[in-house]
Image (cartoon, rainbow, N blue to C red):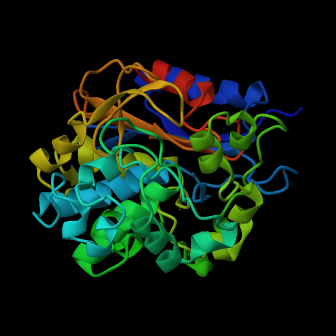
Amino acid sequence: MAETPIHGFAQDRFAGAKKAFEANFASGADVGASCCATVDGETVVDLWGGYADAARTRPWEKDTIINVYSTTKTMAALTALLLADRGEIDFDAPVARYWPEFAANGKADVKVSHLMSHASGLSGWKEPIRAEDLYDWEKCTSLLAAQAPFWKPGTASGYHALTQGYLVGEVVRRVAGRSIGTVFRDEIARPIGADFHIGLPASEDARVADLIPPEAGTAVADTAQSEIQRNMATNPGVDVGATRTRAWRGAEIPAAGGTGNARSIAEIHAILANGGVAKGKRIMSEAGCRKALEPQISGTDLVLNVPVTFGLGFGLPGGMLPLPSANSMFWGGYGGSLAIIDFDKRTTFGYAMNRMVGTTTGDPRAFSIVMDLY
């Protein structure tokens, strides 16, 4: 196989990260991908290469973007943190303060922080729903508001793979009077010129790379064992092919439907790593950024079945991902995308690719680059 062309740059001191990125292509682990890192708000690594499709007919360009599944959650969390920083959301308040219908079926005391940390007991829908229902915001949110939790809220986390975006997004919508995708675009992405979208305009479709599904037998639904895991994985099932449709791309699915690349992931999260400032613009206060680091719940996650500690919207070090810095956080997306924010080193890292593996929270391709970066 011909050598895969890699584009972009890495500062000399991060040459190891570039080598690790190139090695992923040399081994065949990556088909098309991007990785990016910032330090003190400066972009120090920005690499992309390979192909935007399985047939290797379209090159992965500087402005290629792709669906990053659950890495989208980090953007939804940042949007909620921004509103909390402005005093518009209190994470310790009951969800029903902002969304009265949510109090139904024993949920009057569920806090906004429980939504942010996957601890609300609403890891999926009890009513059977179809994949196309994910495009119906009103249906998705009203079903969640009406149903009883699967377990006692606040006692354990159970990864809210799809539901978290609707839950946090509806609180944002009730508070801001605008959808979470609109608030994210107007208050975060656009002011710093970042190319990440929760609800992609049709005008950008030509730039989107095709996700290549994981190998048979390794997808999320194939590994589900408990009733809670099966509910998350199959109601509705995950259809990677849907990410190529206008309906999916245009919908606001804030837990899984975001479209961006490594550059936009790293440059947006520089807001958090640098005390609320990115691209010379103050977006939040430093205290509002550090709020995300406050541990909310720790233990073996009921859905992921691994030890995890959640802060407000992000995974914290230890358990599934031992990060070198105590004040750091992360999350990844189904297939392998990843975001890392390191407050101590004022560093961010983003990785986005099209060849998926059967993981929901990042995989060795990204971690190898991160270790060389550190």
- Residue 172 in view in this figure: yes
- Residue 279 in view in this figure: no
Rendered-image quadrant of the C terminus: top left
The residue that appears at 79% across and 30% down in the rendered structure is 28
Q: Nearer the viewer, residue 150 or 329?
A: 150
Q: Position of residue 318 (x, y in %)?
A: 37, 20
The residue that appears at 77% across and 24% down in the rendered structure is 27
Above or below, 56 relative to 243:
above
The residue that appears at 30% across and 61% down in the rendered structure is 79
Q: Position of residue 265 (x, y in %)?
A: 44, 49
The residue that appears at 53% across and 56% down in the rendered structure is 162
User: To which quarter of the image does residue 322 belong?
Assistant: top left
Q: Position of residue 249 (x, y in %)?
A: 61, 70
Above or below, 322 relative to 241:
above
Q: Nearer the viewer, residue 142 or 251?
A: 142
Looking at the image, the residue that sits furthest to the front is: 105
Rendered-image quadrant of the N terminus: top right
Q: Is residue 214 left or right of 263 when viewed as pictured?
A: right
Q: Position of residue 216 (x, y in %)?
A: 84, 38
The number of numbered badges drawn on the structure is: 0
Q: Nearer the viewer, residue 215 or 39?
A: 215
Q: Is residue 65 left or right of 58 when viewed as pictured?
A: left
